[in-house]
Image (cartoon, rainbow, N blue to C red):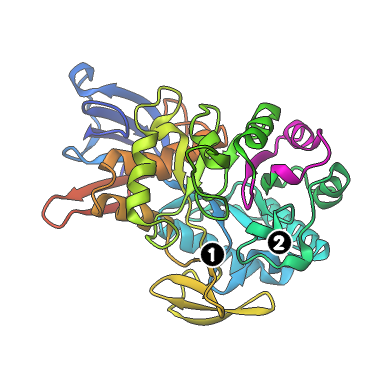
Amino acid sequence: MSDSTVILNARLPQQPGLYQIVMVGNLVQSIQPMAAAQHRTAQTLDVAGDWISPGVVDLQINGALGLAFPDMRAAHYEKLQSICKLLWQQGVDGFCPTLVTTSLENFHGSLAAIARFKQQSSDSGSAKILGVHLEGPFLNPAKRGAHPIEYLQPPSLEAVKALIGEFAESVKIITLAPELAADEGVVEWLGDHQITVSLGHSRATAEQANRAFAQGATMVTHAFNAMPGLHHREPGLLGAALTDPRVFCGFIADGEHICPTMLDWLVRSGRGSLDAPMGGLFLVSDALSPLGLPDGTYSWDTRQIAVVSGTARLADGTLAGTTLPLIEGAKNLVKWGICSVDEAIALVAQVPRQALRMPALSPGSPAQLLRWHHDQTTQQLIWQRLNLA
C-alpha cells in the first residue's frame, strides 16, 4: 500500500455511525464521520461497515511457547522474541508478562531479564512488553488458587520495597490482597512509583476493598476467581469494585473460569457507564506457558499441569489457567450472545488501554489496526491485521 490510506465506512467500538480514518503509514492523521468526510485522492480501503480498532492488549499473561515468565533469564531472549511474534500474530499489540508467586530470587532474576530484553528489542511485527504484572506474593493463602503457599507473605511496605527493588520502572501492575496489609502506606507507595495496584487472590470485605480504592488501587485481578462470591449482605471485593467508577476489572471468558450465566451478568453490570466503556470491564487471557502449544501435560514451577481443550489444571484438579489467546475470549462472548461486537472489541482493545492510561485511537497517535467482521450466519467474530505501511 502507499504511505497514505483512507479507510472508508468503518465502525468504531462504542461509537455510533460510520467513519473515515486517514492513515499515513501507521499514524492516524484524522478520524471523521463519513457524512462530514471530504473526498481525498489517495488509496482507499472500504471496510463496508466492519469495525476498526488498535491491536488488543493483554494485562495478564503468564507465559507462552513453554516458557513461564517467572523462569525468564537472559538465555531465553530468543524464546521471548518468538513469544512476542506469536502474540502479534494473535492480534496483541502490547502485554504485561505476569510473574506468579515464586521466590524473591526468581522474581528478581526474571525482572532483570525482562528489563534488559525491553531495552534491546525493537523488532516490528512483535507485541511490545508494556511492563511486568506481579501477581504475588502478597496474596491471601485462603484464596491462593494455584500459587505455591510457601512463598506467600503479607504486603508490608518493607516486603514490597524488597520485591520491587531497583525494578520500579519495569513493573506496571501488582496484585495484592488488601486485607493483609498492616502498613497503610503500601498502596500509596506503589502509586507514587506509577505502579497500578490491582486487588485479587483476596478475602477482602467491601469495606477493606473500598479503603484500598480510596488509597489509590484502581484494578481487580480476574473478577470472581480467587475471591468470595457476591452476597446480599456482604458484597465483598467484587461488589465494591463494580460500584466504583474509578476501578477497572479484568476477567476471563473461556467458559471455565466463569460460567456463561455469570459472564452475562457481569457484562450487563458494566453497560451504560459514562465513566468508561463497559463500566471498566476488560478481558485478560491469564494464559499459561503452554500457550501456542498443543494440549498435553507440562511442567509448571515444580508441579505439572494438564491442558485439555485449552484449560490447564493441577493434578488435584485445581484450575490453574488457560492456554487460549486473548481474542478467543472476545469471540466467545459474541458467539454466546453475551456481548455485541463493539462491546467485545472494547473489552480487549479499548478498556485495557484506559486501565493503564494509554492513549486511545485518535488523530496524531500511532496505531497498528485490526479489522473485525461479524459473520451473521455463523455468529463468528473474524479479525485480521491491516498492513498499511
Q: Where does label 1 land, which residue?
A: 83
The answer to which image quadrant residue 234 occupies is: top right
The relative height of residue 73 versus residue 140 in the rendered view (above or below) is below
Give 154 or 134, whichever is nearer the viewer.
154
Task: Write the residue at 18% across / 19% down.
Answer: 35
Q: Which amino acid, by three-letter code, is at mark 1?
A: Ile
Residue 182 screen position, x and y as percent? 82, 41
Q: Is residue 324 above or below residue 268?
A: below
Residue at the spot of label 2: 101
- Assess whether residue 189 is covered by the magenta stretch: yes
Residue in front for this viewpoint, 138 or 301: 138
- The answer to whether residue 54 of the structure is visible from this angle is no
Residue 155 pos. (x, y %)? 79, 47
The amino acid on which the numbered mark 2 sits, given as a three-letter code, is: Thr
Q: Gap in Å between the C-alphas at discs 2 and 1?
A: 21 Å
- The answer to whether residue 114 of the structure is visible from this angle is yes
Label 2 SS: loop
State the residue at coordinates (84%, 47%).
Answer: 166
Residue placed farthest to the bottom in the image?
Answer: 297
- Going from N to C along the chain, the mark reached first, 2 or 1, is 1
| Span shown in magenta | 178-203
